[in-house]
Amino acid sequence: MLFNWTVVDSCFLTSSWHVRSVGAFAASVIGVFFMVLAHEAVRRLGREYDRSIRTAYYRREALALAALAKNQGKEIALSAPFRPSNKEHAVRSLFYFVQFGVAYILMLLAMYFNVAILMAIIGGGGVGHFLFARDTATDASTAYEASKDECCC
């Protein structure tokens, strides 16, 4: 396969995605860009969900241990390790399902070697990372967002 700049008469994924005009091609490129942004947003939502269920668990666990220590009259050493419930894990799996599906479609689109589509994928990934991945560069114990219970994109 060779890189190409084909605009009119391009065909992507299915016969119904047959580009017959420059406007339709521009819409395809913009759509792919936003598909990558959506992929990054879903990744962020998955991380936020993981953080929220973990935080809720440790809050409940701290209250339970404090009540137990008060009743027992001594300090309890450690809480049980966190393991999500089946419902929580099903939601986490749904986030993964969406991420995996969108990533696979984007990979298939990249295999057309259309330069504009490739630039939309790469550009969308960069912009999406800028908008949605700031949380990966913070220290959870000292982050402003964590201390204020806020989510900042």
Image (tube, rainbow, N blue to C red):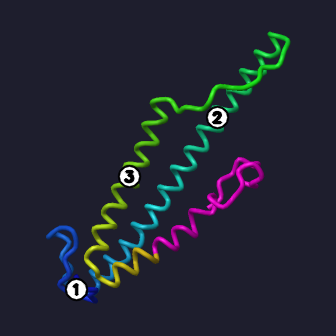
Q: Residues within 10 Å of mark 3 (few under 14, many from 20)?
A: some
Rendering coords of residue 49 (x, y %): 55, 45
> What residue is pinned by disc 3?
98
Which residue is found at the position 46% from the left and 77% from the top?
Answer: 123
Q: Are marks 1 and 2 in contact (CB under 8 Å)?
A: no
Is residue 47 positioned above or below 77 on the image?
Answer: below
Is residue 71 on the magenta stretch? Answer: no
- Judged from this view, the residue extending furthest toward the top is 72
Task: Choose between 85 and 45: the one closer to the eye.
Answer: 85
- Judged from this view, the residue extending furthest toward the right is 73
Position of residue 106 in the picture relative to residue 43 (left or right):
left
Which residue is found at the position 76% from the left and 23% from the top?
Answer: 77
Disc number for residue 102: none
Disc number for residue 56: 2
Q: Quadrant of residue 51?
A: top right
Tell me the SS state at disc 3.
helix
Disc number for residue 21: 1
Task: For marks 1 and 2, give the one nearer the viewer.
Answer: 2
Return the disc, 2 or 3, that comes first in the chain's sequence. 2
Magenta range: 124-153
Q: CA distance from mark 1 to mark 2?
A: 52 Å
Amino acid under disc 2: Ala
